[in-house]
Structure formats: structure tokens, C-alpha cells
């Protein structure tokens, strides 16, 4: 994978059994960078395909 933009923090989550996880994050006061917005849009599309 490519390096993530500096305003996006990523932590791997490894669970033995799949489960629903809710993540709450505080966004930078200046808003998201275009690179982060692009990454999150891709993640959102992938999640919506699974529903």
C-alpha cells in the first residue's frame, strides 16, 4: 500500500470473529485534505457495496 496522507491516521484491527465496529474521529479544524477525502470516498463505496 502507499503511504497515507499525514492527516489520516490508520490502525490495523485484527479480530478472530468479524464484528461491527464504530469508529469516532475528530477531524482537523481545517477540514480534510483532498487526498484523505479521496481515500475515505473509496472506503465508503466499498462498504456500501457490501450492504
Image: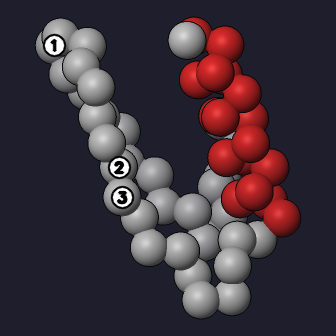
Q: CA distance from mark 2 to mark 1?
A: 19 Å
Q: Are marks 3 and 2 in contact (CB under 8 Å)?
A: yes
Please provide percent x and percent y for residue 31.
Answer: 69, 79
Q: Nearer the viewer, mark 2 or mark 1?
A: 2
Quarter of the C terminus within the rendering: top right
* Corner quadrant of residue 13: top left
Task: Give how far apart the Cα atoms at labels 1 and 3 are.
Answer: 22 Å
Checking the image for residue 46, the label placed there is none
Q: Quadrant of residue 43?
A: top right
**Disc nearer the start of the sequence (2/1):** 1
In this picture the colour scheme is secondary structure
CB within 8 Å, label 1 to label 3:
no
**Residue closest to the far bottom:** 29
Mark sitting on residue 24? 3
Residue lying at the far front of the rendered structure: 51
The reply to whether callout 2 and callout 1 are in contact (CB within 8 Å) is no
* The one of 17 and 5 positioned closer to us in this rendering: 17
Residue occupying image coordinates x 65% and y 34%: 44
The residue indicated by pointer 1 is: 16
Whichever of callouts 1 and 3 sits on the residue coming sooner in the sequence is: 1
Numbered mark located on residue 23 in the image: 2
Task: List x then y, in percent, for residue 47.
Answer: 59, 23
Quarter the N terminus occupies: top right
Image height check: is 38 above or below 9? above
Which residue is at a point 60% across and 72% down the rendered structure image? 7
**Residue at the image position 72 percent from the left and 27 percent from the top:** 45
Amino acid at each position: 500500500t502507499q503511504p497515507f496522507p499525514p492527516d489520516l491516521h490508520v490502525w490495523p484491527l485484527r479480530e478472530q470473529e468479524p464484528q461491527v465496529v464504530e469508529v469516532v474521529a475528530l477531524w482537523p479544524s481545517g477540514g480534510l485534505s483532498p487526498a484523505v477525502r479521496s481515500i475515505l470516498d473509496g472506503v465508503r463505496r466499498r462498504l456500501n457495496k457490501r450492504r
